[in-house]
Amino acid sequence: MKFFVDTAIADDIRELNEYGLLDGVTTNPSLVAKSGRDFKEVVGEICQIVDGPVSAEVAAMDFDGMMAEGRILADIADNVVVKLPLTLDGLKACRRMRADGIRTNVTLCFSANQALLAAKAGASYISPFLGRLDDINLEGMELIREIRVIYDNYGFDTEILAASIRNGNHVKEAAIAGADVATIPPAVIRGLASHVLTDKGLDQFVRDWQATGQSIR
């Protein structure tokens, strides 16, 4: 499964990229607003840090506005993926951008039927929001499983991008369910490497090594 980081903070992206853990980045207007910086400037900087896809979201809600903004975003760098809302106008823009050779990420997906429409429109990625479904007592991971079956049934090339991930269990379960990508907050990615038994074992190894009085260097 590919790992995207869900942030607009360049320092976090650089750090995780240096670990070799990142395959791409997702941003949205809310994340960029938290950075306090110019949107296009932030997207351009991120695209220079990572080689993989960088999702940048349009702000317009109408077809013409989405197309105009999407072309501007796509011109920032070759690895920009234009993020579109899962609305009828968003699907129409997705189809047009696919024809124009612009990759798209259709976002705010909450049902298998929506995911089917996005795939038919030619989306590069579909972003089902797991955490938000869980918040209203629906099974977010079941949505991933349903989309996986539908896409495999018909050979759609749209990649399933598990979004709104809140914890390490979400990452594990999305991988088991067959998501192609998970977009994950920086803190959750870092936390995937942690386990109390790993810490305990390392502490014992260090103490045992120090007791030998040796040095490898």
Image (cartoon, rainbow, N blue to C red):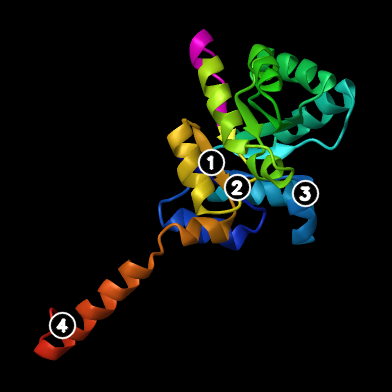
State how far apart marks 3 and 2 are (Cα): 23 Å
Viewer-side residue, 26 vs 115: 115
**Is the residue under label 3 in contact with that under label 4 (CB below 8 Å)?**
no
Where are the magenta residues, as a range?
A: 152-160
Q: Residue at x 70, y 51 (%)?
A: 42
x 23%, y 79%: residue: 204
Viewed as shown, does residue 25 lie left or right of 44?
Answer: left
Q: Name the residue that disc number 2 marks.
A: 165
- Can you identify the residue that label 4 sits on? 209
Within 10 Å of disc 2 (Cα), the crowding (few <14, some 14-19, many 20+) is: many
Q: Residue beneath label 1, please? A: 182
In primary-sequence order, the first of circles 2 and 1 is 2
Amino acid type assigned to the residue bearing label 1 in the image: Ala
Q: Nearer the viewer, mark 4 or mark 3?
A: 4
Which of the marked residues, 4 or 1, is nearer the chain's N terminus?
Answer: 1
Label for residue 104? none
Q: Residues within 10 Å of mark 3 (few under 14, many from 20)?
A: some
Camera-nearest label, 4 or 2: 2
* Residue 1, visible in the rendered structure: no
Q: Amino acid at mark 4?
A: Trp
Give the CA distance from mark 4 to mark 2. 39 Å
The reply to whether residue 15 is visible in this rendering is: yes
Q: Residue at x 77, y 49 (%)?
A: 39
Mark 3 / mark 2, whichever is N-terminal: 3
| Residue depth check, mark 2 versus mark 1: number of the one nearer the observer | 2
Residue drawn at (75%, 53%), measured in percent from left and top?
A: 32
- In this view, the residue farthest toward the top is 154
